[in-house]
Amino acid sequence: ETGVTQSPTHLIKTRGQQVTLRCSSQSGHNTVSWYQQALGQGPQFIFQYYREEENGRGNFPPRFSGLQFPNYSSELNVNALELDDSALYLCASSLGGVSKNIQYFGAGTRLSVL
Amino acid sequence: AQTVTQSQPEMSVQEAETVTLSCTYDTSESDYYLFWYKQPPSRQMILVIRQEAYKQQNATENRFSVNFQKAAKSFSLKISDSQLGDAAMYFCALNSGGSNYKLTFGKGTLLTVNP
């Protein structure tokens, strides 16, 4: 059983650029959630995808967008990067969009915006 | 809205000793789930233990156990026989359903284990 994998591991961008982060969910999982973890903070929920549809969104602007593919892998896109977007971006997969289901996390993508 | 508060930014424990990490939460939902996740320097969040709010019995997983006080909205983690490998950032998290099933995390407690 493969776990949650994220790519790339590290990324450096400049302000105003666009970035795409990728996540492969754990085998058999149909739900992917994305979180932003600023340095020294707990993760903050960005959005969740369940069976290719957005299933909820946190307090993030529209320049944060996502996609889930038929194989349940997912992308997080961020447009017009700002310095405050520098963070660790975590992807988590689970089986079904219900609260009782455990979310399994990848190792994250460290994004630095200069 | 749901909130999670971890009031201990850092804790330390001697190897083989016991340590308790504190967490309080708030939610208006009656059905919810509480979690403790561990994040070592490798960055990957690892589930330590899960508690279902409707279960009165405290969850245990080997050396890890919780003290779940529903009325007080408290959810502490006890680590017994601490090991060097337990050193990490520990996050308390709440999932209280609703229209989506996000996890709300506290700010974390950095645990140091001294040999």
Image: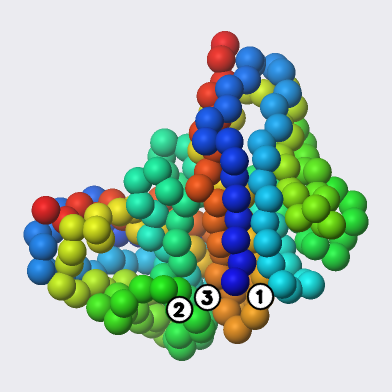
A37 relative position to B59: left or right: left
Residue that badge 1 annotates: B97
* Dot 2 and dot 3 residues touching (CB under 8 Å): no
What is the secondary structure assignment of the residue under circle 2?
A: strand
Q: Is residue A48 visible?
A: yes
Q: Which of A63/B4 is in front?
A: B4
Residue sitting at x 25%, y 78%: A63
From the image, tell me which residue sits under label 2: A57
> In the current view of this chain or complex, which residue is farthest to the top?
B115
* Residue at the (71%, 63%) spot, across then down: B33
Q: Which of the 4 quarters of the picture holds residue B111?
A: top right
- Mark 2 or mark 3, whichever is nearer to me: 2
Q: Using the image as rendered, state which of residue B67 and residue A92 is in the foreground.
A: B67
Give the percent coordinates (x, y) of residue A11. Answer: 19, 54
The kind of residue tagged 3 is Thr
Q: Position of residue B104 (x, y in %)?
A: 56, 62
Q: CA distance from mark 3 to mark 1?
A: 14 Å
Q: Mark 2 is on which residue type?
A: Arg
- Residue B101, horizontal then vertical, whole percent: 59, 74
Within 10 angstroms of label 1, few (less than 14), some, or many (20 or more) residues?
A: some
Amino acid tagged 1: Gly
The answer to which of A95 and B52 lies nearer the viewer is: B52
Q: Nearer the viewer, mark 3 or mark 1?
A: 1
Output the chain of dot 3. Answer: A
User: Circle 3 is placed at which residue position?
Assistant: A31
Image vertical order of residue B14 relative to residue B103, above or below: above
Question: In the orientation shown, which residue stands out farthest toward the right?
Answer: B56
> Marks 1 and 2, Cα distance to the nearest angstrom?
13 Å
Q: Residue at x 53, y 30 (%)?
A: B10
Q: Secondary structure at mark 1?
A: loop
> Quick check: can you spot residue A91?
no
